[in-house]
Image (cartoon, grey):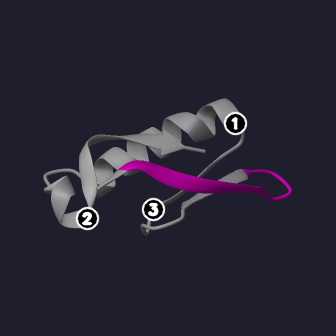
């Protein structure tokens, strides 16, 4: 089972954009601090009420940005 959800970050002219490597999770923000908070929120919402083991994830996976 995986214990890490990995994100890649890119920068547009006005925002930072994060995309999960293995899952359809995307978010953006004006600052990196806001982006980290948005990543946590987007990940939580994506897996809300889901059995993480069905996605090959452990109980409380870490985020790697």
Query: Is 34 on the left or on the right of 3, as rendered?
Result: right
Classify residue 2 by image quadrant: bottom left
Query: Is 61 on the left or on the right of 33, as rendered?
Result: left
At x 46%, y 67%, the residue is 22
Q: Secondary structure at mark 2?
A: helix
Q: CA distance from mark 3 to mark 1?
A: 17 Å
Neighbor class of circle 1 (other Cα within 10 Å; few <14, some 14-19, many 20+) is some
Disc number placed over residue 50 in the picture, else none: none
Q: In the rendered view, would you say 42 is above or below 31?
A: below
The tag earlier along the polypeptide, 3 or 1, is 3
Neighbor class of circle 3 (other Cα within 10 Å; few <14, some 14-19, many 20+) is some
Range of residues picked out in magenta: 3-15
Q: CA distance from mark 2 to mark 3?
A: 13 Å
At x 81%, y 51%, the residue is 14
Disc number placed over residue 32 in the picture, else none: 1
Disc number placed over residue 25 in the picture, else none: 3
At x 26%, y 62%, the residue is 56
Q: Secondary structure at mark 3?
A: loop
Q: Find out whether residue 5 is within the magenta segment.
A: yes
Return the residue at label 2.
55
Q: In the rendered view, would you say 37 is above or below 47?
A: above
Q: Find out whether residue 63 is within the magenta segment.
A: no
Q: Secondary structure at mark 1?
A: helix
């Amino acid at each position: 089972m995986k214990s890490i959800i990995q994100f890649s970050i890119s920068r547009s002219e006005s925002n930072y954009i994060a995309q999960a490597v293995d899952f359809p999770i995307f978010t953006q923000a004006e600052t990196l601090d806001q982006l980290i908070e948005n990543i946590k929120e987007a990940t939580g919402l994506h897996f809300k009420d889901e059995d993480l083991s069905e996605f090959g994830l452990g109980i409380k996976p870490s985020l790697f940005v």
